[in-house]
Image (spheres, rainbow, N blue to C red):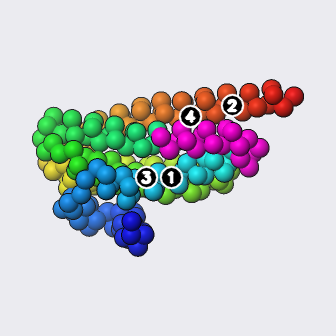
Amino acid sequence: MDINKLVERVKNILLTPKTEWPVIAQEQTDVAKLYTGYIMILAAIPAVITFLTYTIAGSLVAGLAGAILNYALSLGLTFLMAIIIDALAPTFGAEKNQIQALKTAAYANTAGWVAGIFGIIPILGVLIIWAGMIYGCVLLYFGLPHTMKSPPEKTGGYFAVVLVINIVLSFIAMMIVGGIVAAMLIGAAVVAH
């Protein structure tokens, strides 16, 4: 893993997505390289912050469980969204390509993962994370024509369907993590008394 290349990619996708997406689309890679060189590293940011937040609040067990669940669901949802992006491609005149779909899902998540750093800050952090997730939607919209070769007249529909599915799956994932961590916090409080 080249940390300089990682930082450069994050900077470019966040600051100059219109010029970075064509570069991403042309790169030769595979699932393992995308996961080990990018996805697993950036998805760890919110997971570590989850761990720190719950641990600072007094529950090491909830922090550990929340971090592991957050990380596993983030890795899994990225892969699931890639499968969905790829499966929907022909419906919107785009090209099916599993690697390009994984690139799309991974790099569109960059803003949300990086914004996860601010999760340690009460209230303001949540707003910054939401802003990052919204910017991730912008990144997704800009990426689809390059990675999946969606025609301009169908990109909006493709984006909308992928976005709705992503929102639903993300909500379900948040409910799972939140429910399990809440149960652990309640359990820890009961045991403490």
Cα distance between the residues tagged 2 and 4: 11 Å
Q: Which disc number belongs to residue 44?
A: 1
Whether the residues at callouts 1 and 3 have beta carbons within 8 Å, the answer is: yes
Q: Amino acid at mark 1?
A: Ala
| Quadrant the N terminus occupies | bottom left
Magenta-colored stretch includes residue 61: yes
Determine crowd level at label 2: few under 14, some 14-19, many 20+ residues with C-alpha closer than 10 A.
some
Q: State yes or no: discs 4 and 1 in contact (Cβ < 8 Å).
A: no
Q: Residue at x 67, y 38 (%)?
A: 62
User: What is the distance, in whole Å, between disc 2 and disc 1 at their CAs?
Assistant: 21 Å
Q: Is residue 70 on the magenta stretch?
A: yes
Residue 171 percent coordinates (x, y): 48, 33
Asked if marks 4 and 3 touch (Cβ < 8 Å), the reply is no
Magenta-highlighted residues: 55-72
Mark 4 or 1: the one toward you? 1
Residue to which mark 3 is pinned: 40
Between 109 and 72, the one lying in front of the other is 72
- Which residue is pictured at 34% across the width and 37% down the height? 80
* Mark-to-mark CA distance, 2 and 3: 26 Å
What is the distance, in whole Å, between disc 4 and disc 1 at their CAs?
15 Å
Confirm whether residue 190 shows in the render.
yes
- Dot label at residue 177: 4
Residue under pointer 2:
184
At a point 75% along the width and 45% down the height, the residue shown is: 57
Q: Residues within 10 Å of mark 3 (few under 14, many from 20)?
A: some
Identify the mark nearer the N-term, 2 or 3: 3
* Alpha carbon separation for disc pair 4 and 3: 18 Å
Amino acid under label 4? Val
Report, in whole angstroms, how far the alpha carbon at label 1 lies from the one at label 3.
6 Å
What SS does tag 2 mark? helix
Amino acid type, callout 3: Met
**6 lies above or below 190:** below
